[in-house]
Amino acid sequence: MKKTLADINFKDKKVLVRADFNVPLVDDVISDDNRIISAIPTIQYLLDHDAKVILLSHLGRIKRSEDLKKYSLKPVAKRLAELLGTEVNFVDEISRVTLQTAINSLENKQVLLMENTRFADLENKRESNNDAILGKYWASLGDVFVNDAFGTAHREHASNVGIATNINESCIGLLVEKELAMLNKAIINPERPVVVILGGAKVSDKIGVIDHLLKVADKIIIGGAMSFTFLKAQEFNIGKSLIEEDKIELAKQYLQKAIGKIILPIDHLMSKEFVDQSGINSTDANIADDYIGMDIGAKTITLFNNYIKEAKTIIWNGPVGVFEMKNFNKGTLAICETIAHLNNVFSIVGGGDSAAAAIQSGFKDKFSYISTGGGASLELLEGKPLPAIEVIQDK
Ligand code: ADP
Ligand code: MG
């Protein structure tokens, strides 16, 4: 078991907290502050326990110097201060004297947020490549490290693994603790039947999870763009639908290994172009030559719902259609609605777009848990160790 907040005395300590403030920003305006809200309990706990809180997070990807302006954490500091109801001292540095001076003058119950850790990526991707000197330097700024950034727990960066390997004391934060508990509840001795719903566009990212989930799940329902690689493997026509040719063989293997376990669409809503216009329902699982599969069809909605209604545990990752387009959101919203009306079911959602769909459906609160981490939750479901959690001290 990893150390948690309860295992450490934080009084008078400089506590480095890796949070996940990687929020969507449009012209310095935060369009979704869910990740900031999710980080509050840990920060509040530390303030209540007389710590000096030093926050670190990445934001976006930094490749060129132009990105520095676009991805400053300054707007996050402002929103965080509002949510905490306390001042947040923002330091627009990730190293140097200004930062050190600001940290050294922190008093108990004060919060400091330093600039985007990925600003270090401008120089040989030092943050993202877990540069040994950088991790050691950041670790030297504090006494204790708390990792509460679940969204990057599958990555080995200087601001998580680097700090944790170079500091005396470390633990996971409340968000990470909750994420681990919820995701593990779905895969370790879950209530059966376990129904997994997979969709979305990133077949190569998600296909690995099937292998492991085949051991856990009673049914794996596949929709969205992902389904076309599987349908093609069964020699259906898929028209101009999205496909990953190099994954067809793997899809075939899974289908053979899991006879009856993998459920694929039996009809689709199709469109001639990838635009938001009314679609045509196919007659069967085939897609006509010059059409694109955009959403699951009416018969498939019923088919999928019948399996979902039987479930006691549901793991959902990836929309089953192009839900951003009004004409093609029906399948995804129907699934949200079905899950929302179930009693006594444990349902978890992972993935940014699936979470957005759950919120859009208006049934957000009906899900047992919506994970803040897409990639990290998938890797955990795949049975892979998360490096930024592994490195935290055991109790
Ligand atoms: P998540 O963020 O939940 O992990 P992904 O990022 O893998 O999900 O996939 C979400 C994207 O998949 C959405 O932008 C959606 O439009 C797209 N998508 C779903 N179905 C299709 C489809 N049939 N064709 C093309 N794109 C699709
Ligand atoms: Mg996504």
Image (cartoon, helix red, strand yellow):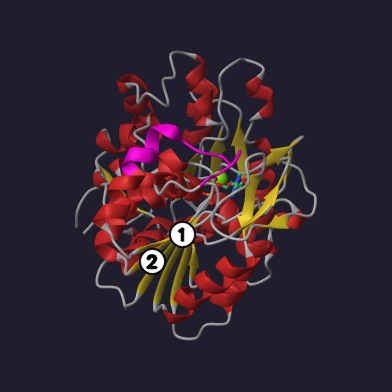
Residue 173's place in the image compared with 363, above or below, is above
Amino acid at pointer 1: Leu
Q: Which mark is residue 328?
A: none
Image quadrant where one finds the N terminus:
bottom left
Residue 240's place in the image compared with 324, above or below, is above
For image coordinates 57% across by 55% down, the residue present is 319
Is 345 or 162 nearer to us in this picture? 345
Q: Is residue 355 left or right of residue 168?
A: right
Q: Quadrant of residue 296?
A: bottom right
Q: What residue is shown with label 1?
A: 264
Is 385 or 315 nearer to us in this picture? 315
| Label 2 packing within 10 angstroms: few (<14), some (14-19), many (20+) | some
Q: Is residue 17 visible?
A: no
- Residue positioned most to the right: 277
Q: What residue is shown with label 2?
A: 182
Ligand 2 is found in which quarter of the picture? top right
Q: Quadrant of residue 345?
A: bottom left
Question: How many angstroms separate mark 1 from mark 2 (CA)?
Answer: 27 Å
Kindly tell me whether mark 2's CB lies below 8 Å from ligand 1.
Answer: no
Q: Which residues are magenta?
A: 237-250
Secondary structure of the residue carrying numbered label 1:
loop
Is 69 or 353 nearer to us in this picture? 353
Q: Estimate the x, y position of residue 76 in percent, counting from the top left.
A: 64, 43
